[in-house]
Image (cartoon, rainbow, N blue to C red):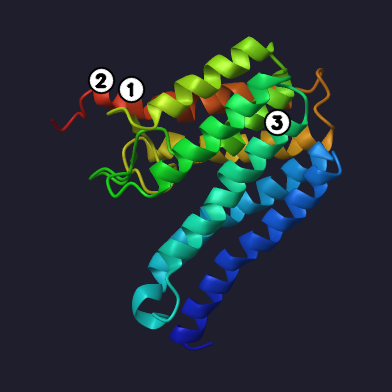
Amino acid sequence: MTLPQRALAVHLLTASGAVFAMLALLAAAQGKWSVMFLWLVVAFAVDGIDGPLARKYDVKTNAPRFDGVLLDLIIDYLTYVFIPAFALFQSGLLPGWTGWAAIITITFTSAMYFADSRMKTTDKSFQGFPGCWNMAVVVLFAIKPGFWVILALVAALAVAMFLPLKFVHPVRTRRWRAVSLPMALVWTLCAAWAAWVDFDPASWAHWGLVASSAYLLLAGIAQQVIPPRDA
């Protein structure tokens, strides 16, 4: 394959996330939550590899007809925000008005965050919680806390989107990447297994989900507190 063909193939790989999003939505519409999360995990894995490939083959130069950043944002909004918000509402984890409050908060604040030109920091981390509601919701499905806990978490993460807090990108943030990247892989494995066993409360994957999610949520904030060694 020529370099332009490889660059175009990367765009096609990114676009496949839209197909996985539709398959996840169809499963969610039928109440098949485990199947929905399995498709979202596949989409998450694709999102993890298409960025490095896009940079390797320089898609902006070799396949400039398609805007890879815009394509990625569209699919990320579907798989990270829209479908998880629907699942949180439709599953009954948030009854009555709490479900409405959650989906309105999640979809509205995430739309504003995804359009924020300052969402990336100089070290390629995220400025504010990066709208990874898919990661939050799969943990909620696994541990099933009370609805007040869920509502409080939704409110806290929505506010955190616009606070001067740093959240690591497991691939692009170089500091602690030797830990962050394996943690992201652990999260992916645990999420897939938890969904595969239909969120069996006895599954070991739940502990792995909580631990890896806590690291990915707090690592960037810890980096703000702990100065790098070369400083």
Look at the picture and state if 226 lies above or below 47: above
Residue 86 seen in render: yes
Seen from the viewer's position, the closer of residues 125 and 189 is: 125
Q: Where residue 13 sits in the image (x, y, percent)? A: 59, 68
User: Which of the two labelled residues, at mark 2 and mark 3, occupies the earlier sequence position?
Assistant: 3
Q: Disc 2 designates what residue?
A: 225
- Mark pair 2, 3: CA separation: 36 Å
Q: Disc 1 designates what residue?
A: 222
Q: Disc 3 designates what residue?
A: 89
Name the residue rendered at 38%, 37% in the picture.
Answer: 168
Q: Is residue 185 left or right of residue 140?
A: left
- Mark pair 2, 1: CA separation: 5 Å
Front tag of 3 and 1: 3
Look at the picture and state if 139 lies above or below 111: above
Amino acid type assigned to the residue bearing label 3 in the image: Phe
Answer yes or no: do the residues labelled 3 and 1 have beta carbons within 8 Å? no
User: Which element carries disc 3, helix, strand or loop?
Assistant: helix
Q: Is residue 110 left or right of residue 174?
A: right
